[in-house]
Image: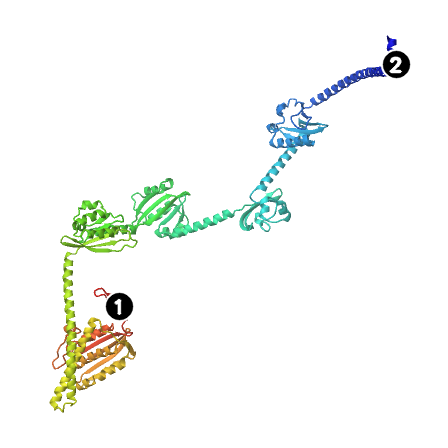
Amino acid sequence: MNAGFGNSLAGDPIALTAVLALIGVFCWAMWSLRRLARGEDEARRRAADLELRLNEAEAALAAEAHVLLIWRGGAGKPDRILGNMHGLAGLLPPREQLLDFPAWLTPDSASVLAGCLEGLRHEGTAFNIGIATGSGELLEADGRTAGGFATLRIRPLAGERRNIAALSQEALSRGREAERLRAILDAAPLPVWLRAPDGKLVWANKSYAAAVDAPDGETAVARGVEIAGSAIPEKTRPGGEARIHAVVGGVMRARPVGQGPAAGGAAGFAIDTTALENAEKELDRHIKAHTSTLNKLDTAIAIFGPDQRLRFHNAAFAALWPLDANWLDTHPTDGEILDALRSQRCLPEQANYREWKAKQLTAYTTLEPRESWWHLPDGRTLHVVCEQHPFGGVTYLYENVTDELRLESRYNELIGVQRETLDNLEEGIALLGSDGNLKLFNPAFARFWQLDPAFLATEPHIEDLARHGRQLAADARSWDEVRYSVTRLDSERKPVSGKIPVLDRIIQFVAVPLPDGNTLLTFVDVTDSARMERALRERADALEAADRLKNMFLSNVSYEIRTPLTSIMGFAESLQLGLMGDLNRKQQDYVRDIRKSAIDLKTIIDAIIDLTAIDAGALELKLERVNVTDLLEQVAVKFTPAIDERDLTLNIEVGADVTDFVADPKRVEQILANLLSNAIGFSERGAKIRIGARQARGQLQLWVSDQGPGIDPEFQKHVFDRFQSRSVPGGHRGPGLGLAIVKSFVELHEGQVSLLSKINQGTTVLCSFPLDGPAPPQRSFNPRDGRKTA
């Protein structure tokens, strides 16, 4: 079978190759097994060696107090924690809390260690630092990387290394404090700076840079820009303070600057007190304004501090008391001022002054305001108010109410007098308020309208009064006008008056609006006066009719007489001229007497007509500029025959300052003619007559003076009345119209006429005229006939 198998292999090359391959594989497998067996033995030896070395390393590590944290990856919890603190386990927390650094380290150490560990695990940055536990123990933290591992070793320190670590920790702490302080100062809202011993600027914060318009503190230091614009004043070195003013951001700012020694150099700051300075100025202005206002008050004011000393007093306080102003400026106490006032009898008289003074001083320990009345020995009365001051102490207000009390007393007295006066008046008085209710009345009002005083005391409304008044009034509508005058809402109320017929009486009322909105009603019984007025009016109408009849009669008679009188004068003149034949001497005397009588009668008729025209207001003056001298000479020439006939002397006297005046020359000539005619008629033969003019008190005065028998004083009262005449034995007697027409013409010129006469010493008549003539007449409306009159 083997031979056959061999023969079959020999005859099949593929099969042979496969067998040879299997044999080769078997041989390689056996070799490999033996090799693996030898490698395994070597590996066991190496493992045993490594384990020995690891045990030795761990033993070496365990021999030193430390804790080792090992990370295989880049993050997460440590893969292994090795070591112990050998009796110092209290320095570290349990192993699962080792990475919670803030729980067992100081904040600075926890922050630094966390940062270093982060750089170690992510960037492979080694570190060796000192850290401090919360209990104050110093430890060393060492971070290393080896291959793909990161390790952190924490171990205690001792000896020189501990000292070095302590110094390092302190330096780290100081550095962080410095950084924090620098950050705080850099963020401070006030400028802060540091200077070198030579005064050169070495550091400045952001506020300093902003104050000097620099982008940052380093730039400000590099430029050496001073916040005050120049070097800080010497008085601020060291520890001094000065106030500077500088423009910051386009605004003038006030900054107190302080600077003091720091680390061999100097440190300074500047506080922006612009708002405080403005507030101080504003407060100072307010204080001055309040002081000025208080000094202008009539009320005396004194302010005492908590120490009871005078802090402030106004001018009225100094004027109220006879106290020395310099002494008041020494701030005396309240008690001292009371003692000084008592010594000068300027306090109310007290039986026990000490007790009264102690009571006054209790104001400093009480909170309630206190008022009192001081009746001083000099007759003054003061209203004293004492209250607590908001800043401590008290404030006294002294108001002199002497005049007020006196006025109040007089007012009450006046009210009482007015009340009694109203109660005793015959007129009914009622005062109604703006609401229409009765506020005040007198007994006459109740009597007029038969009202019960008890009802009036209830202050009834005007509607109730009007309702009752309508029942008594003959015309019920009369009270409506009274009611309307009280209740009307016109913006400009005016007084209203009227009459109310009541049975057989007539009551006149007047409603007067008062400034305070009230209305005053007065009621007067005018029955008798109404009857008297009616009778007087009827009499006046009768007299006016009689006067019109008289004027009409005089006018008609004057004109009727003038026509035949003109004929008589014409015929007499014809006879005197011999137109009808020659006349003998006696006939000529008769004709001359006829002409003279006709002329006198014509003068009387003209005077009557002029007076009638003046009474009717129909006579108008024809004003012009009149030369006084020419006028007097003209009048004198006309009367020359009469003067020569009676052997009289006429003197014309004109003042040097008299030139001309405005008047009606015809009427003034008529005035002088009447006066001169009277003077000639009442003068004896050989007498002297004076006529003249002068200027006095802005008026022109014309006068005529004679040396006649004079006028009786009783008759002088009626000398200017019409148809008043007197006869003188062997002398002149006229119709009594000359002086009447003189007076009328002078008054028509808005002048005055006066007369001076003594028995047997002559008479002088003086006429005064305005230099510029009478004022232009003003037209007025006559309601009787509807015409405009002058």
* Residue topped by disc 2: 11
The number of numbered discs placed on residues in the rendered structure image is 2
Q: Nearer the viewer, mark 1 or mark 2?
A: 2
Task: Indicate whether 589 appears above or below 241.
Answer: below
Is residue 237 shown to the viewer in this render?
A: no
- Quadrant location, the C terminus: bottom left
How far across and down, in percent of the image, does residue 426 sit? 17, 53
Which type of secondary structure does the marked residue at label 1 adopt?
Answer: loop
How far across and down, in percent of the image, does residue 528 sit? 14, 57
Say which mark, if any, is on residue 779.
1
Is residue 440 shown to the viewer in this render?
A: yes
Closer to the chain start, of discs 1 and 2, is 2
- Amino acid type at circle 1 is Arg
- Amino acid type at circle 2 is Gly
Q: Nearer the viewer, residue 115 or 501?
A: 501
Q: Residue furthest top?
A: 1
